[in-house]
Structures are given as structure tokens and as C-alpha cells.
Image (cartoon, grey):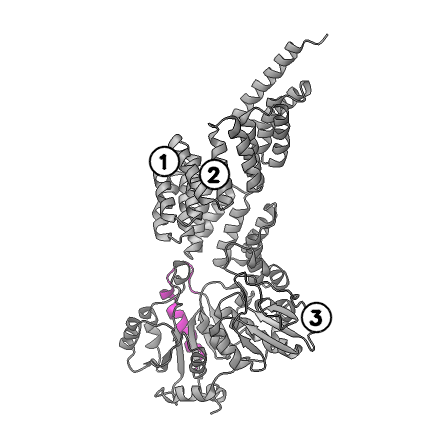
Amino acid sequence: MPNPAASQQKVLEKLLKGVKHQKAGELEKAQRCYQQALKKDPKHPEALNLLGVTYRQLGFPRRAVDYIERAIRSNPQESSFYTNLAHAHLDLGSEPDVLLAACDGALALDRKEREAWNIKGIALTRLGKFEEADKLFKALIISYQDYIDAYLNYGLLLSQSGKVEQAIDLFNKAIAVAPDNAALHVQRARTRLSAAQFEQSIPELSEALKKFPGNSDVTHEAARLMFSMNESHKGVQLAEAALGADPGNAQKALTLGANYLMNRQLPAALEAMLLARKLEPSDNSTIDWNLSLAYLANGHLKDGWALHKARFDSDTTRAQRRVFDVPAWSGQDLAGKTVLVWSDQGLGDVLRAGTMLPELIAQAGKVIIETHDKALQVLQQSFPEAICRTPMVDHALKATLSDFDFHANITDLVDQLRPDLAAFAKTGHPVYTFDRDRARSFLSSLTGSDDKPVIGISWRSRNLAASRARYYLTAEAVAPLLTSRDAVFVNLQYQVQDEEIAALLSAAPDRFRVLDDLDLFSDLPGAAALTACCDFVVSANTSVADIAGILDVPTIRFGQQEATLLLGEETPPWYPSTIYMHPHTDRSCAEYVPEIIGELDRQLADWTPLRRNTRLHL
């Protein structure tokens, strides 16, 4: 006759042996012990719970949920079971309400279940209940001053609610309490990165790299920082090390791919992005967006355009998707139909994509263009047959007018009109027009332009963030260009500073010209007319170069890797008269100026004003 006491003793022995294996990290051995215990007692709550925990530790949260829920059904009075269930749901990515239910189940039985409080704070944060979560985490830290997870999650709450400095202060205090906790250093770095506090993060991460050699997460944050600072030649090495130490991590593969891409290691970038996509178990728009860029950078237009709309759902872009009651145009016959064209990106992107508009206008009964005011100035001038207007939307970006049959994002016209490189041959350059009378007037004011080339120059963007300024020049750095040849150099730099003008006039007083009455930032038709006067333009990778490109003015454009512009080619297919030059990735852009001067010399070796005069009908 079976002896229940002896049977339970054997179950207990198996559980104790399993716990010993589990603490030693021998999870498969622990599972065998728990499974053997369950053969003797299939509803043993602790065996079910512990087996579920091992599945969570092995990366199988769904299976963990199944076993822990069975444990709760066997013993609904054990608070730790609910906490373990909350952990498993957290790993699974369950909805915040599911997390709250599990946490509340634990806390109803034991108010001292600190991990349940912690996960409840996470759930409240995800629900946007910042004030309630704030109170919870403060109380938790007061009660458990050495509970580092509470510091971590409270810091994330503060960061997400825009209280970056408070979050940094909290992480600093937590690091003082637990200096050997790498996760605190990682979260501080992530918070600084989200606030673009690059300079402050450099010494902190440098110290962390020394303190935690070989720590994949610390190394990964350093790689992300280098990418954000446009120091991808350094970021590549760090990202390779991070992924090498954690080869199954999709985010680390993504960071490696992004650094490869900006370091112009294009095939390697695509390989890393594909790995990230393979490693990510669920849909991830940020990976898809970056994979789109990698495909395009390698000239795989079909694959790249197919994923390009992922930008609307990625949290790394600012693309805003508009809402319509009519279908998107996907190649339908537009005869007698009206199509609304809308934009989601910046001025240069809109101007570039606008080179496809003549083909759309030719197909449609009517075209309406809605975009920002500055682009509209140029679009209306060049495409008078289209209706150009500011976006007619409500606060939710839903169209407030319905005077069209289809809508089309201007960038995504590529799906139908630029599916491959051969399709770019359809473009008749120049696509855009300009005010020829105004251009002639500008030219007449440029003394010396009759027998000297007119060279327009622009050296930076308005946005001088570290991530962009790496490939811009200062006025002092661009000065050697003005002294390199006898020419008329005209300012195309918008929002130029008095100090910059003074520096260039000092370097080349007889060669550098500024049209003081022309607002190059706000008056886009005027900027286009002045650009049309030029024999050649030298510009950083900004809308100045796009204006030159749409007017088919020969241009040297210098800057970082630009996937959607170059599409795997040396010369931008959008602008055949543009030469794209890549400054050194491991040196300052100023050191590249001699290369730009050399290329300009080659392009102007046999200069005559014929092309410029033909453009101006002179």
C-alpha cells in the first residue's frame, strides 16, 4: 500500500536537489528534478512554480506562465507565485493590465512583496500613470534603500516623463550605493543618450568600460554613443565586441549594422541588419526601418522601398502618418481622378521626391500638394498646374477636406515611379523652374562674373547637433576654398552669422560676395534664383545642395553616408549633376577641404560660362 508520507519525502528531496542545481545555474538538471517531482505529485504547487521559473530563466516566458498559473491554481494563497507570474508576463511583453493583476494578487497576500511593487511601478509607467508610479517608487526606495531594481525603474520613469536631470541624479545616487552594478551605469548612459547629453556621457562610459571589461551591455551603450556622435569608426569596434559577447541580441546586431552603415561598410551593414531581423522574435519597425536603409545603401531598391514605410512606426524617426478616408494610390489609373500628395519629412527630402511630380501630374486628372510653407513656395512656382496648399488636417492628422480620390505620400511615390535605378532615367532635368529675371538681376550684381566662374558655397546646416556637425565645416575651415582660385564665391549659407561673414571676407575680400537683402532661409524662390546664377555649388549635405540638384546646377555635395540619396551609387541618381564626396570618418571634416578643392579644380579645368548662360537664357 502506498505510503503518502514517504512519497512526499521523495518529492521534497527532488525539490531540494532541483533548487541546488538552479542556484548553481544548472537549469536543465533542475528541470529534470522538478519534472520527476511532478510525476509523483502532478499538482505540487512548488514544483510547478519552480519549473515555471526555470523556463523563464531559459528564455521561455510563455511556458513559464503556463506552469506558474498551474501552481497558483494548486495554491492560490502563495504570494511569491503571483510575483513570479508577473516576472514571466514582464518577459513575455504582456499588457500592463496583465502585470497589474499579477502584482495585485501578490500584494493582496503579502504587502512586503517588493518585487511585486517594483513590477507594478513598471506597469503604471507603461500605462502613463506617472504620478502614481512616482509615489510607488519613492516609497519602495525609502523602504528598501539597497533595492537597485527600484532605482533602475524609477530612473526610467523619470526619464520617460521628461525629468532627465532627476533621473541622472537618481542613477548617480544609486551608483554611489552600488558602484559595481553595471546595469545602473547602462541606464544612466541610456538616459543621457535620450537627452543628447553626449559630452557628459563620454567620461562616464569610459570609466564604465574600464570597470566592467567585457560587459556586453556597457560596451553596447558605448557603441550607441559613438553612433550618435557620428564617430562610427569607433562605434564599429565597440558594437562588434558587444554582439560578439551576446550573439543572440537583436538590438546589438542593429547597433552594429547602423555603425557599419555610417562607416560606409555597406555589405556588412546589410548582413548585420538581416541578422537583427532574424533574431527579433516579433515585428520591430525600428529594425525594419534600418534594414530599409541598408538595402537602399546597397542598391537593392525593391527590398528597401518595401520596408520604407516602417519609418512611421519606428520610435527613432519623427515621421508622422496622416489619416485619410480614401485609399492610398498604389498604381491605380488616375485618369480623371484627383490625388492628394502629402509629406512627412524635411525640406530637402520633399524637394528631392518632388522630382517625381511631373510623372504623377501627367497621369492624374488633378494633383493637390500639401506640405510645409517653404517647400510650397518652390513647388507652386515649378508645378503651376497642381494645387499647392498647407496641410488641411485636425489635431489627429486626419484630413479635414475630401476633395480627392486617392492620397500619396510624396516620398513613397518611389513604389510606383522609382522601383529601380533604370526608372530614374525618366526624369528630365532640370525638373524645377526658377525666377529667371530675378536670377539675371542677381548675376548682374556679382562683379567679375562675366569672365570668372560663380561658385556658391554653403558649409553647414542650421542644426549643429554633434550627430550632424561632424560632417560640417566652420567658416574658418572653408576659407581655403575661397583662396584656392580666382572666382566669384557667393554665399548660399542660410542663417549665416556675422562672425562667419567677417571670417570669409577677411580671407578673400575681393572674391566673397553676400547678398544682404536676400533671406536665404525664408525666401526659397530667391535662394533658388541665386543658385541658378552659379556655375558650380559646393555645399554640405543640406537643402542648399538639394536646391542646386533640382535645378541641375553642377554641385559638390559632401557629407555622411546617405542611403536614400545615393541608393548604392557614387552619384545620386536623383541629381546627375551632383558629385557626392565622403569626408574622412576618422578625422575632422576640415581636413577634407583639400580633397574638395582638388575635385573643384578638376571640374572647372575647362570652365566656360556657357552652361550657366544657357540656364539663364543669356
Numbered circle sitting on residue 179: 1
The numbered mark at residue 227 is none
Disc 1 marks a residue whose amino acid type is: Pro
User: Dot 1: within a 10 Å radius of its alpha carbon, few (fewer than 14), some, or many (20 or more) residues?
Assistant: some
Where 34 falls versus 549 (above or below)? above
Name the dominant secondary structure of the magenta segment: helix
Left or right? Give the position of 427 relative to 221.
right
**Dot 3 or dot 2, earlier in sequence:** 2
422 sits to left or right of 19: right
Q: Secondary structure at mark 1?
A: loop
Residue corresponding to mark 2: 121
The magenta span reads 583-605
Amino acid carrying label 3: it is Gln
Q: Tell me if 312 is positioned left or right of 466 in this view.
A: right
Q: Is residue 430 visible?
A: no
Q: Nearer the viewer, mark 3 or mark 1?
A: 3
Q: Residues within 10 Å of mark 2 (few under 14, many from 20)?
A: many
Of the 4 image quadrants, the one containing the N terminus is top right
Q: Which residue is mark 3?
A: 332
In the depicted view, which residue is nearer to us: 552 or 146? 146
